[in-house]
Amino acid sequence: MKKLFFLTIAAFLLSNLIFPLSVSAASANLLISANKSDYNVGDIFKLHVSVISDGNNLQVVRAKITYPADLLQVQGFTLGTLFPQKSPGESIGNGIIYVGGYRIGPATSSNGLLGYATFKVLKEGKATIDLVSGSRMVTPDGVDIYGGGNSITLNLNAVPKPEEAPLAEKPEVKISLITPVVTSNTNPDNTWSKNNTVVLAWEETPYNQGYVLNLSKEELSDIGNKITTTDNSYKYENLEDGIWTFYIKAKYPTGFSPIGHYTIKIDTNPPSLPYPTIESRLDTNGQNIFQIFFASTDELSGINSYQIKFDDNSFQTATSPYTLSSAEENAKTVTIKAFDNANNESTAALAIGGYISNLKEQQAKKALFDIQASSAGQKQLVFYLVLSAIIAILVISVIVILVKKRKKS
């Protein structure tokens, strides 16, 4: 499988040396590949996303990939070491994968793995996976030099029907090579959980002689034939965070069942602290409106929701920015909780009473000053009007006297 992956990359590099993708001075490309072109329903496989820098220094790489959601289920994306920091705005699901990474410090011109998406085959068909417009490859100068990417088509096949073989004893008994169906009360299938002690169970199948088990973060096509247990449950303790696949097959007198899969997602780390801040703005009536801003990040399972409370009141669901009601403006402290998709939580608080009271006091003083200034202005206006009237009367009187003297003379 690795040989097929490296041959695909080599072919892509050779084609770009002979037929350049772009005539621009700087260009880099992305390449997607799978370990093989044929999978069965229920298989788990990885889609590799590789960076072809063409010698250009890169700081940020983002890939936008489409896939048929009716045929494939994406179970997550894992970054490689080339761009190890996860870019914000990740979106995975509903037929689109939009992921990326960046480097802190020097850029790199190395070719290598951006990361890989993990898929599960839902039903048979032909699945075309495309790198589409919206992917980005950004230099340290902020220039996007993404030149394009490729697409692959996978053949998704139905699981072969279990073979039936007769027992040696008479009368003849046909044995179905049934794959065990796995369930878990601690970690539901393909769902993030903070439980790192995982208990898996399955119904005992007729005529089975034991079960072969394997737990791995890697894609496996063969788990060997050594019996792990004859029980119909198994327990794993202190698993590290990440996406795991549990593989199982049953042994029968006539052979082994097809391999079954079960996805375990573990995240035991809380999200970053959702430090709140407070800001104010004036509404159309000149009154202050107070808003609480907050945000958090979670590197593995992602942020699910936030809650807010004031002083000792109960928490309630909230989004940022949160606008305070008139009653909440009297609170002394606001507390924010952030929850990730594994139900881990983190809490941060902010004292807001002094900020709000000081701002209201300043607004009241300004209003009083405006009233006093308006009153003083009105008094000055009356004084100047009266003075102007007196001056006008005096001027008219002088003019009348001068006219009378001129007529007498």
Image (cartoon, rainbow, N blue to C red):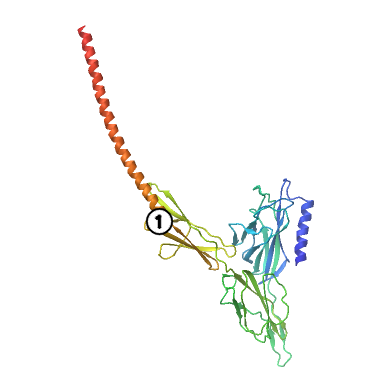
Which secondary structure, mark 1? helix
Residue pointed to by mark 1: 353
Determine the image quadrant of residue 202: bottom right
Residue 65: x %, y % from top left: 65, 59
Decide if residue 10 is on the left or right side of residue 359.
right
The residue positioned farthest toward the top in the image shown: 409
Determine the image quadrant of residue 207: bottom right
Residue 129: x %, y % from top left: 67, 61
Q: Is residue 55 above or below residue 219?
A: above
Residue 178: x %, y % from top left: 66, 81
Decide if residue 196 is on the left or right side of residue 406.
right
Q: Residues within 10 Å of mark 1 (few under 14, many from 20)?
A: some
The residue shown at (48%, 57%) is 276
The residue positioned farthest toward the bottom in the image shown: 170
Frontmost residue, 264 versus 74: 264
Frontmost residue, 116 versus 354: 354
Residue 250: x %, y % from top left: 68, 81
Decide if residue 323 is on the left or right side of residue 383.
right
Tally the marks.
Answer: 1
Frontmost residue, 221 versus 154: 221
Amino acid type, residue under disc 1 in the picture: Gly
The residue shown at (21%, 9%) is 407
Q: In this view, does 263 lie above or below 396?
A: below
Quadrant occupied by the C terminus: top left
The residue shown at (68%, 74%) is 159
Q: Is residue 259 above or below residue 385?
A: below
Quadrant occupied by the N terminus: bottom right
